[in-house]
Amino acid sequence: MKDVMLVTGAGQISMAIARRMGYGKKIVLGDKNIENANTIAKIMNDAGYDVLPFEMDLSSRESIRAMIAKCREYGEITMMVNGAGVSPSQAPIEAILRVDLYGTAVLLEEVGKVIAKGGCGVTISSQSGWRMPQLTAEEDRLLATTPTEKLLSLEILQPKNIKDTLHAYQMAKRCNEKRVMYECIRWGERGARLNDIAPGIIVTPLAIDEFNGPRGDFYKNMFAKCPAGRPATADEVANVAELLMSEKGAFITGSTFLMDGGATSSYFYGPLQPKE
């Protein structure tokens, strides 16, 4: 039996974190597109890791439970990395809410029931959740604490209250951060920790879709006018994950780490401020 790392989303960020933290572990890598999972698994297995690709759908509790069951065939789940999701240019409003918002909430809940003592998890949200109109304290509380099966029934998530796919994505990522705060308490009862990373623009195939999509100029302008002056790499996200998932982060739980090259700061107080 081995310690098991559960990873969702066979993309560059998930792979970078798994490579950084998954040596010596059984890594079960889930993705809705099994070809993506097979590709990443081959790259990592050829580099000496032990990766099992697994077809899973983050929007389905049944699928999430099946993946957890597969992980537990190999040992205790000691690490979770949630890098699965869809972007505003890739999916309609309903799919974004179902995958990024509901699916993430279910995953944190289900893994939290079995995570090993001393275990840890990170989920990937986005800078996007920091640049939406402020929610009320009660709305934030509802996103944090509403039972998962009732989340998509919340008034603030109804179609008439969601302007477009970007707004849906922002709401999903805001909810991710609030659910991490809520679920870290349950994880803590098992002696485990849970945190969130909110990256800015990271160069991945998903980001390249965005660069070439309807908001491409918006994204290029964003990293040109943020203090860092560039997008980031997936390995830089893994740097933050390494802190959060190692003993150096033993006192960090329920936190969101915004790593966006200063884009959010520029949006509120610098050259990225929206023109009236």
Image (cartoon, rainbow, N blue to C red):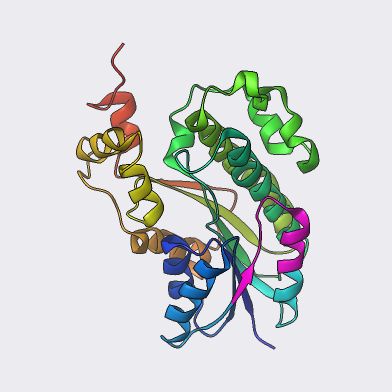
How many numbered markers are drawn? Answer: 0
> Does residue 34 appear in this view?
yes
The percent position of residue 71, horizontal first and vertical second, equals 70, 75
The percent position of residue 134, horizontal first and vertical second, equals 52, 22
Q: Nearer the viewer, residue 270 or 102?
A: 102
The percent position of residue 170, horizontal first and vertical second, equals 51, 34
Q: Nearer the viewer, residue 200 or 182?
A: 200
Quadrant occupied by the N terminus: bottom right
Q: Nearer the viewer, residue 128 or 250?
A: 128
Q: Residue at x 54, y 60 (%)?
A: 9
Name which quarter of the figure residue 44 lies in.
bottom left
Is 16 located above or below residue 188 in the figure? below
Q: Residue at x 51, y 32 (%)?
A: 165
Is 243 located above or below residue 253 in the figure? below
Left or right of 241, for residue 157: right
Q: Residue at x 76, y 54 (%)?
A: 61
Q: Which residues are magenta?
A: 53-67
> Does residue 115 appear in this view?
no
Q: Residue at x 31, y 43 (%)?
A: 212
**Is residue 254 inside the magenta stretch?**
no
Is 240 located above or below residue 16 in the figure? above
The percent position of residue 110, horizontal first and vertical second, equals 75, 58
**Residue pushed farthest top?**
276
Left or right of 16, for residue 83: right
Quadrant occupied by the C terminus: top left
Name which quarter of the figure residue 50 lies in.
bottom right
